Image (cartoon, helix red, strand yellow):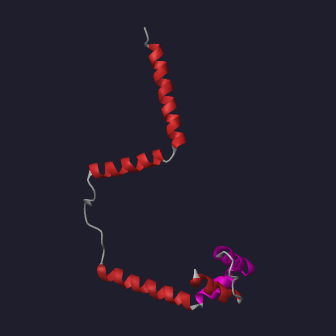
Amino acid sequence: SETLLGYFSSLSGEEPPSSVNPADYVLGVLDAGSADDAVAAFKDSSLCKQIDSAIDTDKKCAEEQGPTTTIGRNPGLTFFTEFGLLFRRQFLVQWRNPSYSFMRMSVSAGATFILGLLFFN
């Protein structure tokens, strides 16, 4: 957040107060100026040059490594491993939503009671 506050304080020309929320300060600076001024200031900044050089470095590394995809079928995970992971994920989703689980149990109990009454001698 120091880099962000430093950049936007140079853009606005004033230091942010110590008790300000960084997001509020950034929005205040952007609200005070036009979007075109902010874009032009960013393109002329050293931060933009650092980001561009980092992207170029990553791009060169990726080009040197070559493609990482495999031709044909990607073996990946087995069916049972994927099934276990997806079952666990769905179980956690249901566990974290108790009202939905309670509603499903109530509907199941009600349906069981009604079907039991239908076949009761």
Q: Can residue 67 be found in the magenta stretch?
A: no
x and y, in percent, of residue 99 in the image = 54, 41
x and y, in percent, of residue 8 in the image = 65, 84
Query: Across the whole image, how many numbered discs are drawn on residues?
Result: 0
Q: Can residue 40 be found in the magenta stretch?
A: yes
Q: Quadrant of the C terminus?
A: top left
Image-based side of 62 in relation to 52, left or right: left
x and y, in percent, of residue 83 in the image = 32, 48
Image-based side of 32 in relation to 78, left or right: right
- At x 25%, y 62%, the residue is 72
Q: Nearer the viewer, residue 32 or 101?
A: 101
- At x 52%, y 90%, the residue is 49
Q: Nearer the viewer, residue 52 or 72?
A: 52
Q: Nearer the viewer, residue 39 or 18?
A: 18
Residue occupying the far front of the picture: 19
Q: Is residue 117 above or below residue 72?
A: above
- At x 25%, y 59%, the residue is 75
Residue occupying the far top of the picture: 121
Q: Is residue 78 above or below residue 121?
A: below
Residue occupying the far right of the picture: 32
Q: Quadrant of the N terminus?
A: bottom right
Q: Which residues are magenta?
A: 22-43
How would you classify the magenta stretch by its main secondary structure?
Answer: helix
- At x 43%, y 49%, the residue is 92
Image-based side of 90 in relation to 67, left or right: right
